[in-house]
Amino acid sequence: MIPAVMPTYGRWDVAVERGEGLQLYATDGRKFLDFTSGIGVTGLGHCHPHVIAALSEQAKRLWHTSNLFRIPGQEKLAQRLVDNTFADTVFFGNSGAEACELAIKVARKYQSETGHPERYRVIGCQGSFHGRTFATLAAAGNEAYLKGFGPPMEGFDHVAFGNLNEMRAAVGKETAAIMVEPIQGEGGVRAAPEGYLKGLRDIADEFGLMLVYDEVQCGMGRTGKLFAHEWEGVPPDIMAVAKALGNGFPVGACLATERAAVGMVAGTHGSTFGGNPLAMAAGNAVLDTMLEPGFFVRVGQMAKLLRRRLETFAVSYPKLFAEVRGAGLLVGIRCVVPAADVVAKLRQNGLLTLTAGDNVLRILPPLIVSERDIDEALDIMNKVAREWPA
């Protein structure tokens, strides 16, 4: 008999009832150190006081109006994102998949508006993940997620991540855009090689394409800058953002330059819930905290400490772990043993982590992680590794 909640998830046997900072508390009394951040969402940890205060105050005044009205919180958050990024304009939705879906629409619309309606194809990268809608599944091209849902949506091509020669060779007369994650999360925590984003920018400019970044997981401070591409200094034309933007409240955003958004006029896109007052209160509270002086400096310090500790850890157990990869506080360890088994053992010992493609153990602590938290996590990891069956 099918359960009341559609069984589409392989859930852990943990029912959580509350959280505080990096701690999660289950209904059966168990306590966990959360190094998943709700899959990269709770960048400021659970129940961050400033986010609670902002949402509580907004909830007393107004929840929803629809986008028939001006929403002051939208205008404020959009302007702040514009002021702190490459973008000139922002559309607010509810999720990363929606943000990616709109990014594809904006890229295609740009080509149509500038005299190239035949350009609609998007080149993506193998191992990518852009969401669960039909378009975003097709954009990623992962057979495991596409199986059983009929023919994939047409209009997407795929090349190896990090290979500029393959990317250039894939450009055709119908190509509209290149879409890439600066750091692949689900695909195995793989950071773009140095110079890759610059190479993509050059290809896009040479052929008149839109360069689209998906920073849903790697953005919003995860690498020690507001967005991961800032380390290379290579801006896109369009970018999808979500996850940590709301610290747990559903909100996504599609950022674009004025040039890229030339065709996005009244009636071309919309969302009933997108950018509602509650979501904007959460997003503005998150930016209040992240844009404080020294916030990203501290993230960078903790990221370096965690990386050093994980590299020492992995080298100490070569029969279990092969390499450390990723950037900032989006870190992976490619495992020799099944990564899912490692995640299960860590969870049994009070540490929550994730898997990723390529048999990778994925580690995503909140950006407020402390040295003490890292010490506690590594103590648990070392205990599990020492006790691993021979």
Image (spheres, helix red, strand yellow):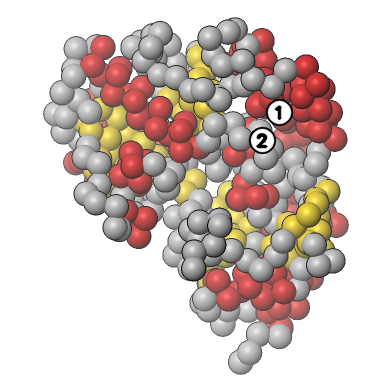
The kind of residue on which mark 1 rests is Ala
Q: Classify mark 2: helix, strand or loop.
A: loop
User: Which mark is drawn over residue 161?
Assistant: none
Q: Mark 2 points at which residue?
A: 249
- Residue 350 visible in this rendered orientation of the protein: yes
Residue 380 picture quarter? bottom right
Residue closest to the eye, 298 or 95: 95
Residue closest to the eye, 53 or 242: 53
The kind of residue on which mark 2 rests is Phe
* Spot occupied by residue 273 in the image (x, y as percentages of width and height): 56, 25
* Mark earlier in primary sequence (2, 1): 2
Q: Are marks 2 and 1 in contact (CB under 8 Å)?
A: yes
- Residue 306 visible in this rendered orientation of the protein: no
Q: Classify mark 1: helix, strand or loop.
A: helix
Question: Horizontal placement of 288 versus 327: left or right?
Answer: right
Question: Horizontal placement of 229 versus 112: left or right?
Answer: right
Instruction: Please determine whether, in this image, residue 5 is positioned above or below residue 85.
Output: below
* Spot occupied by residue 184 in the image (x, y as percentages of width and height): 47, 49
Q: Mark 1 points at which residue?
A: 282
Q: Distance between the residues labelled 2 and 1?
A: 7 Å
Q: How crowded is mark 1: few (under 14 residues within 10 Å), some or many (20 or more)?
A: many
Q: Which residue is drawn at 25% across and 19% down?
A: 111
